[in-house]
Amino acid sequence: MTSLLLLPGDGIGPEVTAQSRRILDALALPGLSVSEAPFGGASIDAHGVPLTAETEAAALASTAVLMGAVGGPKWADVAYDRRPEAGLLRLRAAMNVFANLRPARCFAALAPASTLKPEVIEGLDILFVRELVGGVYFGVPRGIETLANGERRGFNTQSYTTSEIRRVATTAFELARVRSGRVCSVEKANVMESGVLWREEVTRLRDERFPDIELSHMYADNCAMQLVKAPRQFDIILTDNLFGDLLSDLAAMSTGSLGMLPSAALGEAGRPGLYEPIHGSAPDIAGQGIANPCASVLSLAMALRYSLGAAEVADRVEAAVEAALDAGARTRDLGGALTTAGMGDAILSKLAG
């Protein structure tokens, strides 16, 4: 028996997750139980906290977790440690999902939708491996304080240990062995000591355990430029929490829309994975039924592949999304007019076919 916990969350999260649930219902996978729980702002409204102990326990007991999105202006004035986003950070830490896989793939049918020239973007297939539970988002001390002269100071801590770097780098190198055998490690070793340590430990690990992998290094600012100039030079990009957050969003728009990109967050073998579209809660369009559900559906495919032991089913889901796009199915972010449910219908028709 395997189990999938759905955390639809806020904004467009419930709308896109509903389409993934329709895909699951159509697949009718034997031995899979599906449950749902409030999360983020929805959990604040219902229980006063973004992540309840019950939801955390359910996530840790599941085989995989599929999230929608969290946050929105409604909760902007909530104390920082009780905001929807704080619940997501706590869930990631509790699940210890340290390796965030963010594929940036340009479907052939969507090359014209990119802001980059088709000859630059066609065939793009980058996999970002982002460290997810360390770095500046989790480092301490952090806070805002008032100095003796009356000024206020905000501070955060960027910190990594050898073991934190090596475990996510191991994931990147292992994935490279089933892709092109190339990894580009990205940091700012020229100005940050944490970057120096990152470069040293990644290089040492490659030399010790993965001599067959071609490893290169690049500063994060140069990587941002190269992702716009010549993105197809990359296969796997390994980087830390902050740079991975920024660079993968940059690459996402190169593929045509943020609404197309899924993600997987993985930890130790045998532990549940956390899957989510990388788009946010998009409160400006929430409730209108026009959000693109493809990233959620493709996140479901990643859950099928990496946690639920159903790689062939994952292939079917991904092929159905691509076939729907090839047939002209487009939501508004892709220049079309389909509703969220309409795109779900298009994917389901190709899945059935």
Image (cartoon, rainbow, N blue to C red):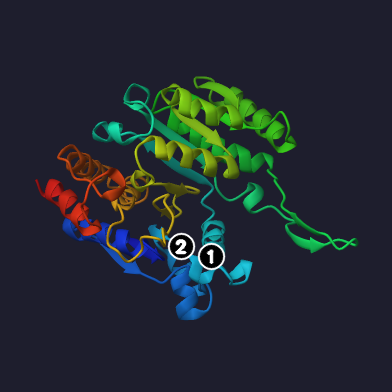
> Is 274 located above or below residue 106 in the figure?
below
**C-alpha span from label 2 to label 1:** 9 Å
The one nearer the camera, 145 or 157, is: 145
For disc 1, the marked residue is 87
Q: Are marks 2 and 1 in contact (CB under 8 Å)?
A: yes
139 left or right of 276 in image? right
The image shows residue 98 at horizontal and vertical percentages of 54, 48
Give the numbered dot on residue 263: none
Quick check: can you spot residue 1?
no
Left or right of 152 in this view: 280: left
User: Which sits in the foreground, 112 or 28?
Assistant: 112
Q: Residue at x 60, y 31 (%)?
A: 221
**Which marked residue is nearer to the observer: mark 2 or mark 1?**
2
Give the labeled residue for mark 2.
70
Which picture quadrant has residue 123?
top left
Residue type, numbered disc 2: Val
Amino acid type at circle 1 is Gly
List the single residue furthest toward the bottom.
Answer: 47
Q: Is residue 330 left or right of residue 8?
A: left
**Could one spot residue 348 in this view of the protein?**
yes
10 Å crowding of disc 1: few (<14), some (14-19), many (20+): many
Assign a secondary structure to mark 1: helix
Side (left or right) of 263 relative to 150: left
The residue located at (50%, 32%) in the rendering is 237
The correct choice, above or below, for 140 with respect to 124 in the image is below
Q: Callout 2: helix, strand or loop?
A: loop
Residue 260 place in picture, x, y as percent: 33, 44
For the point 33% across and 62% down, the residue is 3
Q: Position of residue 35 (x, y in %)?
A: 33, 68
Up the image or down, 118 lies above or below 110; here it is above
| Residue 318: x %, y % from top left | 25, 42
Judging depth in this view, the residue of 67 and 34 nearest the camera is 67
